Image: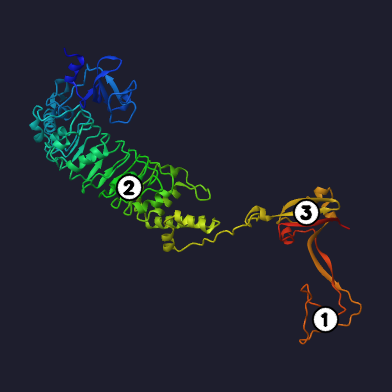
């Protein structure tokens, strides 16, 4: 005898779509569960917070899910009170068609006359025929579709003027269902399937170019695989597509897999898991002009230094709001990867919350705006704001000035070359505005003092007073009065009773000693000087003695004269005496 599981298998199969208490799901498994009696349905919830696991229970994997969430799946008993599904026409009537006649309680009277009765009839009839309505919003209506549905052939006459259709979040199980429905709307140009979890296993059985009239397609949160499902779907069935929205699908890589339709100009991949622009290299050869990448995890252009920079030759508009960009290097290399870029949006990236110059100086949000413009020469709008000629001039000259300041702060040619490499626009800016003065600081030897530092403005004075000797570091700008005050306090003596003598460490000649002075010594051109073995020129007068020398000392009298006018170096020795 067939068991419960056999009976259940005839009623359910993997891939079926149901709604339970308003929550849509897909059956992924039909069978038994170890340790539990009876048969079970393994389901994947559209709302991933509803589940308890991801198809793995008790350490055993029972089924795969499209979602990567750890709580997207559950096991349910087969006997459930599922929500009643609707056909397309039933959903249409429920959403758009009112009762043709009001009840007695709804009749409006003015005095004794019934008002608006004719108006109600006309409005109901207009709704019934959908006159003047071009957009149908039938999302989350527990809808299914079959070519065998009652009155299905009336869809064309009722919906002949419909151009936009939203049937997302419903219970479609196959592409064939959607294709049969859409072919009955002759003017349909925009189709939204957000949240639908239909299978594409029947794609090869659906006639190619079945959605030839569709110009805009939205496939957000369908969790289709990019390479094996979404790209083939678009290639085969939507040859005239101009705009594709495929947001929140957990894509992490857009691999090359054939060309997207040449007609595709706008592609929205926001909310996916891309970490670099190189993850989208499969789009580089496409004709996409507008690329929207909001709320991804993009931080760099390539993932590693060895990676290849992709070139998106057709992209003119790029939206990078709320990503993970934290370094200017991203924008420095963006012009090479997007040579046609005209419009950019970048707000919400972490780099704009903590902007600093090379010397650590904090920069404002306005500085960030200007530095972004300066790095992108083809940009026409930034964050929806048009860039005027004056703004570009101010931005580029400001950026050039910051680079010049960074170059001036370097200590070697190697460092300067590295800075120029990190700022690819430097050469072009110099060509446009002229090369700024980038004279670098003098390279200091070990132990040398930077002349611009505070230490260069101090003098180490060694004071000597009898047997007492001590050292003070004093500014060169100190007057002699101030220094007398310092020393007087040190010695406990009235300052004006002290006398300062600067010992220069140099010597001066004081005179010549001779036994008999016979007047000036004359030189004649016929005489030849001779040098002794030490290289000193001998005197022409045989009786001349060596000169006498005395230490050079300079008195430093009280006054307003600054210490720096006496001392040229960084140290000096001063003798302190009592004034007579």
Of the residues tagged 2 and 1, which is closer to the observer? 1
Residue drawn at 26 percent across, 39 percent down: 226
Tell me which numbered mark, 1 or 3, is placed earlier along the sequence. Answer: 3
In the picture, residue 108 is in which quadrant?
A: top left
Mark 3 surroundings: few (<14), some (14-19) or many (≥20) residues within 10 A = some
For numbered disc 2, what is the local secondary structure? strand
**Residue 474, position as x, y percentages in the image:** 72, 53
- Residue pointed to by mark 3: 462
- Residue pointed to by mark 2: 318
**Residue 357, position as x, y percentages in the image:** 50, 50
In the picture, residue 56 is in which quadrant?
A: top left
Would residue 571 appear left or right of 495 to someone viewing this image?
Answer: left
Tell me which numbered mark, 2 or 3, is placed earlier along the sequence. Answer: 2
Mark 1 surroundings: few (<14), some (14-19) or many (≥20) residues within 10 A = some
- Residue pointed to by mark 1: 540
* Residue 564 vertical placement versus 264 (above, below): below
* Residue 72 vertical placement versus 227 (above, below): above
230 or 387: which is nearer to us? 230
Of the residues tagged 1 and 3, which is closer to the observer? 1
* Residue 151 vertical placement versus 513 (above, below): above
């Amino acid at each position: 005898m067939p068991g419960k599981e056999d009976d259940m298998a005839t009623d359910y199969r993997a891939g079926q779509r149901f709604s339970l208490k308003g929550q849509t799901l897909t059956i992924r498994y039909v069978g038994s569960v170890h340790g539990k009696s009876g048969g079970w349905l393994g389901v994947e919830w559209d709302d991933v917070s509803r589940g308890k696991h991801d198809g793995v229970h008790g350490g055993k994997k029972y089924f795969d899910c499209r979602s990567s969430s750890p709580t997207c799946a559950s096991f349910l008993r087969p006997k459930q009170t599922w929500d009643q599904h609707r056909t397309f026409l039933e959903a249409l009537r429920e959403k758009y068609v009112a009762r043709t006649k009001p009840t007695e309680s709804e009749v409006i009277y003015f005095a004794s006359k019934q008002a608006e009765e004719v108006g109600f009839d006309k409005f109901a009839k207009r709704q019934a025929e959908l006159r003047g309505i071009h957009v149908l919003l039938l999302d989350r209506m527990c809808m299914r579709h079959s070519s065998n549905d009652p009155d299905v052939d009336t869809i064309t006459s009722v919906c002949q003027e419909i151009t936009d259709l939203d049937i997302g979040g419903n219970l479609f199980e196959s592409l064939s269902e959607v294709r049969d429905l859409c072919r009955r709307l002759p003017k349909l140009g925009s189709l939204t399937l957000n949240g639908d979890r239909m299978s594409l296993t029947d794609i090869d059985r659906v006639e190619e170019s079945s959605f030839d009239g569709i110009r805009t397609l939205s496939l957000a949160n369908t969790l289709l695989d990019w390479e094996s499902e979404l790209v083939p779907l678009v290639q085969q069935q939507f040859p005239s597509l101009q705009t594709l929205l495929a947001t929140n699908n957990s894509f992490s890589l857009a691999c090359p897999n054939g060309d997207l339709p040449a007609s595709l100009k706008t592609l929205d991949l926001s909310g996916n898991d891309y970490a670099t622009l190189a993850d989208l290299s499969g789009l580089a050869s496409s004709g996409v002009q507008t690329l929207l990448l909001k709320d991804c995890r993009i931080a760099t252009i390539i993932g590693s230094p060895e990676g290849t920079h992709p070139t998106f030759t057709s992209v003119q508009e790029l939206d990078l709001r709320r990503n993970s960009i934290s370094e200017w290097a991203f924008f420095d290399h963006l012009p090479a990867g997007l040579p046609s870029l005209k419009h950019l949006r970048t707000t919400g990236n972490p780099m704009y919350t903590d902007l600093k110059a090379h010397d650590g100086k904090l920069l404002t949000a306005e500085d960030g705006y200007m530095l972004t413009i300066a790095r992108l020469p083809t940009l026409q709008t930034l964050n929806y704001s048009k860039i005027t000629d004056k703004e570009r001039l101010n931005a580029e000259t400001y950026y050039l000035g910051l680079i010049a300041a960074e170059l001036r702060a370097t200590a070697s040619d190697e460092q300067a070359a590295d800075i120029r490499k990190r700022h690819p626009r430097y050469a072009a800016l110099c060509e446009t505005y002229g090369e700024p003065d980038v004279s670098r600081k003098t390279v200091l030897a070990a132990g040398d003092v930077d002349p611009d530092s505070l230490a260069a403005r101090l003098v180490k004075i060694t004071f000597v007073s009898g047997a007492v000797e001590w050292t003070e570091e004093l500014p060169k700008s100190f007057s002699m009065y101030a220094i007398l005050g310092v020393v007087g306090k040190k010695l406990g003596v009235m300052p004006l009773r002290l006398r300062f003598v600067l010992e220069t460490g140099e010597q001066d000649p004081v005179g010549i000693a001779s036994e008999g002075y016979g007047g000036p010594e004359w030189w004649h051109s016929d005489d030849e000087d001779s040098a002794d073995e030490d290289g000193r020129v001998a005197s022409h007068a045989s009786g001349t003695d060596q000169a006498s020398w005395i230490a050079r000392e300079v008195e430093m009298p009280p006054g307003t004269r600054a210490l720096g006018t006496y001392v040229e170096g960084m140290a000096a020795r001063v003798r302190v005496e009592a004034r007579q």
